[in-house]
């Protein structure tokens, strides 16, 4: 008999445009270290893009507002994006089957692919398609998680090391590959403590001794969260156990 479907403990909250609710976005960046470390690398890189930009796995198109006004934006996402909590009626997003993109060769100057590759059943195909639609010397900006719980079940298929990312990109035909760790082991511990605290505050834990333990865990979470942000500012912690990776590559 097939295994019963697995229920996801916490559904990820789709990232909204920073312009929609600026203070809410900033607050989320304080608590959500995955998002904070994505923003750390992505925001300055987006400001330098020009021409036509494709956002692969666009979701709610949160990064569009950070692109220069002179760029031409287009998003693309899978037809079942609603299973990821995304709006599937966006006029600036094309929906497809996740295989061959319905886009012309050499038609984009830059491609974004933010926290998407782990959800592609065939990541090599996705990267090959991205290369195909990029113009010569076009740029890819990509992020993936490493230390992250399973999410968007049943569409969470991979975790990539630095080495695996490099091999995938080389095999697809990319050059000038630059890979950087997002966060460190302190951030990874903080992230796990926050998730554990949220889980402990659920009704099943609201009893003695569950509640006191949950409160102690919450205090540890706050302490480690402050330590994590300090470690990012001072360059502390080990890069061998990051939250994820950010990379840039060219065609």
Image (cartoon, grey):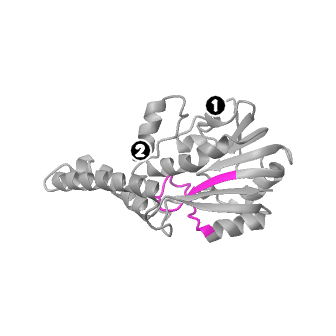
Q: Is residue 156 above or below residue 21?
A: below
Q: Which residue is mark 1?
A: 89
User: Given this view, does label 1 or label 2 mark the residue nearer the observer?
Assistant: 2
169 or 76: nearer the viewer: 169
Mark 1 secondary-structure assignment: loop
Q: CA distance from mark 1 to mark 2?
A: 30 Å
Q: Residues within 10 Å of mark 2 (few under 14, many from 20)?
A: some
Residue 26 position by quadrant? top left
The image position of residue 248, as x and y in percent, is 69, 56
- Provide residue 54's location: percent of width, then percent of height: 73, 42
Q: Quadrant of residue 23?
A: top left
Q: Is residue 156 magenta?
A: yes
Q: Give the residue drawn at x 22%, y 53%.
A: 214
Q: Main secondary structure of the magenta part?
A: loop
Near-viewer residue (225 or 198): 225
Q: Is residue 212 magenta?
A: no
Query: What label does residue 167 carry, if any?
Result: none
Badge 2 marks a residue whose secondary structure is helix
Report the side of 142 relative to 35 (left or right). Answer: right
Q: Which residues are magenta?
A: 141-162
Name the residue: 69% across, 34% down: 68
Task: Please indicate, yes or no, whether residue 162 appears anywhere in the rendered image.
Answer: yes
Residue at the (43%, 33%) spot, across then down: 24
């Amino acid at each position: 008999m097939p295994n019963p479907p697995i229920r996801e403990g916490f559904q990820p909250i789709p990232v909204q445009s920073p312009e929609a609710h600026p203070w809410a976005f900033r607050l989320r960046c304080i608590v959500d270290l995955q998002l904070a470390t994505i923003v750390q690398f992505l925001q300055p890189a987006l400001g330098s893009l020009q021409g036509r930009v494709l956002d692969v796995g666009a979701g709610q198109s949160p990064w569009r507002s950070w692109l220069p006004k002179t760029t031409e934006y287009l998003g693309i996402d899978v037809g079942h994006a609603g299973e990821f909590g995304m709006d599937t009626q966006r006029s600036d997003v094309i929906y497809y089957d996740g295989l061959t993109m319905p886009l012309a060769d050499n038609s984009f100057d830059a491609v974004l692919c933010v926290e998407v590759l782990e959800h592609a059943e065939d990541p090599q195909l996705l990267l090959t398609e991205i290369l195909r639609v990029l113009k010569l010397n076009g740029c890819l900006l990509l992020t993936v998680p490493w230390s992250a719980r399973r999410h968007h079940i049943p569409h969470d298929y991979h975790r990539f090391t630095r080495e695996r990312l490099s091999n995938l990109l080389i095999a697809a035909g990319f050059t000038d590959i630059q890979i950087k760790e997002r966060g460190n082991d302190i951030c990874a511990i903080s992230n796990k403590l926050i998730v554990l605290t949220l889980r402990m505050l659920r009704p099943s834990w609201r009893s003695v001794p569950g509640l006191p333990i949950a409160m102690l865990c919450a205090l540890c979470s706050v302490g480690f969260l402050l330590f994590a942000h300090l470690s990012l500012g001072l360059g502390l912690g080990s890069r061998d156990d990051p939250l994820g990776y950010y990379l840039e590559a060219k065609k």
